[in-house]
Amino acid sequence: MEAVPPSSTSSVSNKSKTITLEEWNGSSPTKLSKTFTIKASSSSVSIRRSGARFTHVWRRLLQAFVPEGFPSSVTADYVPFQIWDLLQGLSTYIRTMLSTQALLSAIGVGEKSATVIGATFQWFLRDLTGMLGGILFTFYQGSNLDSNAKMWRLVADLMNDLGMLMDLISPLYPSAFVFVVCLGSISRSFTGVASGATRAALTQHFALQDNAADISAKEGSQETVATMIGMALGMLVARITIGHPLAIWFTFLSLTLFHIYANYRAVRCLALTSLNPERSSILLHHFMETGQVLSPKQVSSQEHVLPMQLTSWSSKKAYSLDKKVHLGTRISSFDNMEIKEHLLSAASHYTKAKYLLVESKGMINVIVHKDSNAADVLRSFVHALVLANNVHKSKSLHSEGQMWMENQYEVFIQKLKSLGWKTERLLSPIIWRAHWIYEPLEEKTD
């Protein structure tokens, strides 16, 4: 057999070797698209582009507005919420142009009689009252924003509508101009605090891959585009309606009605998985009746998105066990009779718990121990809901409630976890706690 020279062997080996390289683009492993295919050998290299160039450019542009890994990196309610949120934002920017135009006119822009110092002072008072209003709102309601994010998100935008309305009517009351614009500024300050705080809570809800910062950044890009479009449309509308008060009011009120509707649809899209008092009440009531747990989407359709005082007409549609429970009751709020009749008799049932449940006039008061943790607080609230559900049905209220907790509580929590509910904590602020030492008296015998 004839030997092949080494150089010839190397040449044959190189000719027989080829490599194929594929380039894939996409921020999610499940959403990749092939962009290039390269086939190389020692004698030739071929390059083939996959897909149209426009498709690649569009995909790169989209990455500036949607989170990395979209849609698998966000919850299912992210897209519908963002659509309605951007639509309501668009209407806000258009109305801002109309209200600002009216406000500047009332201050005296364009009039020879107006003074710079007068306009500056009025603007300063407007901003100052807004700042003070924001501080006061944070002081009174700041701790409730997490537990009622959907409600406060909607209320924030309604307050913004009120603030814009005040700016628009300010030229109609020259003698009370400063008072009217200050009221509008206070109203908008509530919007700034509530909207910013609830948006942070919602961003955490949307983030499935610890990508809250990315979601927040991409939302900023979306709002920037909406702002630019809204400003352009706002200037066009202001130009068309200038000098026509009826057209201005018709446009403003129409956009306000759409703004309210879009906000309502936006918060209704949300299916939050955190437990707050109302969602816990709905879940427990259904579990006690059927033995099954509702999904976040099912609960979302039943919970209120407006303060209970404004939705009393729909009270039959939702369960309000949580309104019969006072979490974090001050022990100094009990009088001597209540301590003897209710607190003392109830204490014997909670010797191993880090909370006390006291029934008084149909209300269940939860006294939280100062050493209790998040799991203890959630357990105490669920226990209180059980008592509230049976308060007029059972004579041995505490004993039956204790039995239910021993037999059903862990089952309830496990079923919640299986449907994606976050059971680590209850979203409800607790300001007052207590410490106690219970010592049962021993009867003396002869």
Image: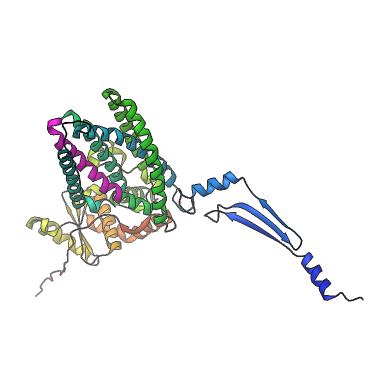
Q: Is 77 on the left-hand or right-hand side of 366?
A: right
Whether residue 392 is situated above or below residue 249 in the rendered picture: below
Is residue 402 at least partly visible in the picture?
A: no
Residue 42 belongs to magenta span = no
Of residues 108 and 402, the one nearer the viewer is 108
User: Which scheme is used to colour this image of the protein?
Assistant: rainbow
Q: How many numbered circles does the render carry?
A: 0
Of residues 267 and 288, the one nearer the viewer is 267
Outermost front residue: 112
Give the percent coordinates (x, y) of residue 237.
34, 29
Residue 178 belongs to magenta span = yes
Of residues 283 and 197, the one nearer the viewer is 197
The picture quadrant where one finds residue 365 is bottom left
Outermost right residue: 1
Give the percent coordinates (x, y) of residue 409.
34, 58
At 33% across and 28% down in the image, what residue appears? 239
Q: Is 171 on the left-hand or right-hand side of 228?
A: left
Give the percent coordinates (x, y) of residue 363.
19, 50
At 35% across and 50% down in the image, what residue appears? 202
Q: Is 44 on the left-hand or right-hand side of 318?
A: right
Is residue 347 at least partly visible in the picture?
A: yes
The picture quadrant where one finds residue 174 is top left
The picture quadrant where one finds residue 320 is top left
Quarter of the picture holding the N terminus: bottom right
Dominant SS in magenta: helix
Which residues lie in the magenta part?
A: 174-196
Give the percent coordinates (x, y) of residue 182.
17, 40
Whether residue 208 is situated above or below residue 155 in the rendered picture: below
Quarter of the picture holding the C terminus: bottom left
At 17% across and 48% down in the image, what residue appears? 132
